[in-house]
């Protein structure tokens, strides 16, 4: 059988105009696509990220968002009878518009609290009953507003101490004792019984702090407190954590039947960082360049932690980065810039990005 010119023409037509373009048009793969069989990949956002170049970077690479600040008690509830919803609402709307998962951060934390929270109208410190009822109102109002939209909440953030004591001696603790932790989870669960509720903390790979967190969670679970997951903030550095300490934390926390999320991942290029608020041993305050040495150390750490995440995918239900690119990180400042993320100041993937997507 010989090819008729007509048939040939038809075949070339299909090849040229229909099939080839389809093959060529393979949507650029983003981080979330590489990890689609593992866990959602999230990012902490601020309002300006939801526009222009940052917006497309988010939509290409991430399947989940967290508000970096907008849902914290100070920003969202600045006065006892007044909430400020605008920014939080716009972030939630962005998530809904683009079918992203939305994590809520955070309901009770010693940081970024509003001034009114601990004081009565005469300026005196409130007692435990008043504080707990204010926390209850706050949690109920915020969680109810986003019920069915925000699928998971960091209910209590950073309640465990870094020093030898068990609980952080925050005003929350000083007024309400450890009970504020348990109650916060109960209030959140009552407001949205379907939301996945997390205890969230940093330095979770430090053996002493890990043990304290474990003991607290175990006790809460034994009491029937509705807590479903533990958030490991993952504010790490080029020299911390080790593979074995990271694995131990995942194994220990998941042995309680809790799901695990890495909620605030970044890898500081300065050694010595131990976590969200504990900044020790940083001597390189004058460095502002991302050196090849930093790049190498950082990509090795990123490679290792993502290997561990993949290995434990059964227990891990999310990995969220704390900020989008090195253009802006909460770690910038104090006289020097940091470069803790997978995208550079031009929003381009860094070498570390290729390390975590090659597997
Ligand atoms: C940080 C924000 O990124 C900053 O913009 C803000 O000034 C302070 O808080 N642990 C947490 C986060 O749980 O809420 C913190 O976010 C970083 C440490």
Image (cartoon, rainbow, N blue to C red):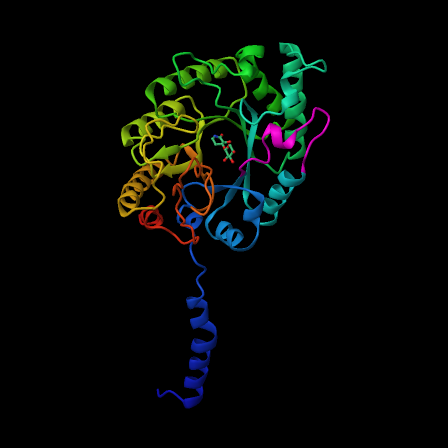
Q: Position of residue 77 (x, y in %)?
A: 66, 29
Quarter of the image holding residue 4?
bottom left
Between 323 and 146, the one nearer to me in the picture: 323
Residue drawn 46% across the image and 80% down it: 13
Position of 161 with respect to 251 (left or right) is right
Q: Position of residue 222 (x, y in %)?
A: 48, 13
Residue drawn 36% across the image and 44% down it: 288
Position of 144 with respect to 161 (left or right) is right
Between 333 and 321, the one nearer to me in the picture: 333
Residue drawn 42% across the image and 34% down it: 316
Residue drawn 46% across the image and 82% down it: 10
Q: Position of residue 23 (x, y in %)?
A: 42, 67
Position of 12 with respect to 83 (left or right) is left
Residue numbers of the magenta segment = 67-85
Q: Where 1 falls versus 313 (above or below)?
A: below
Between 57 and 175, the one nearer to me in the picture: 175
Q: Is residue 178 magenta?
A: no
Q: Quadrant of the N terminus?
A: bottom left
Between 265 and 278, the one nearer to me in the picture: 278
Q: Where 253 falls versus 296 (above or below)?
A: above
Number of dots carrying numbers: 0
The secondary structure that dominates the magenta segment is loop
Quarter of the image holding residue 115?
top right
Q: Position of residue 325 (x, y in %)?
A: 44, 47
């Amino acid at each position: 059988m010989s090819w008729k010119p007509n048939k040939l023409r038809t075949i070339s037509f299909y090849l040229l105009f229909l099939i080839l373009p389809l093959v060529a048009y393979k949507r650029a793969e983003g981080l979330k696509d590489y990890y689609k069989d593992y866990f959602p990949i999230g990012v902490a956002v601020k309002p300006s990220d939801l526009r222009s170049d940052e917006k497309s970077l988010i939509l290409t690479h991430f399947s989940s968002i967290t508000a970096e600040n907008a849902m914290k008690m100070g920003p969202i509830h600045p006065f006892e009878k007044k909430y400020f919803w605008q920014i939080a609402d716009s972030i939630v709307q962005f998530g809904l518009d683009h079918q992203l998962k939305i994590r809520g951060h955070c309901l009770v934390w010693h940081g970024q609290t509003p001034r009114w929270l601990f004081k009565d109208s005469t300026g005196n410190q409130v007692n435990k009953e008043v504080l707990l009822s204010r926390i209850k109102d706050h949690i109920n109002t915020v969680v109810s507003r986003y019920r069915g939209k925000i699928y998971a909440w960091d209910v209590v953030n950073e309640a465990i101490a870094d020093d030898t004591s068990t609980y952080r001696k925050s005003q929350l603790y000083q007024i309400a004792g450890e009970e504020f932790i348990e109650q916060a989870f109960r209030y959140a669960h009552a407001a949205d019984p379907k939301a996945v509720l997390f205890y969230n903390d940093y330095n979770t790979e430090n053996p002493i702090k890990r043990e304290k967190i474990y003991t607290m969670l175990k006790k809460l679970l034994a009491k029937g407190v509705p807590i479903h997951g533990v958030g490991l903030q993952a504010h790490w550095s080029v020299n911390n954590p080790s593979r074995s300490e990271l694995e131990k934390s995942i194994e220990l926390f998941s042995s309680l039947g809790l799901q695990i999320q890495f909620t605030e991942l970044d890898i500081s290029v300065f050694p010595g960082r131990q976590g969200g608020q504990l900044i020790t041993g940083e001597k390189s305050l004058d460095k502002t360049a991302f050196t090849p040495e930093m790049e190498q150390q950082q990509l090795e750490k990123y490679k290792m932690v993502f290997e561990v995440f993949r290995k434990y995918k059964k227990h891990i239900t999310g990995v969220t980065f704390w900020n989008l690119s090195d253009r802006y990180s909460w770690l910038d400042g104090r006289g020097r810039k940091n470069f803790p993320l997978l995208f550079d100041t031009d929003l381009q993937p860094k070498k570390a990005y290729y390390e975590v997507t090659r597997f």
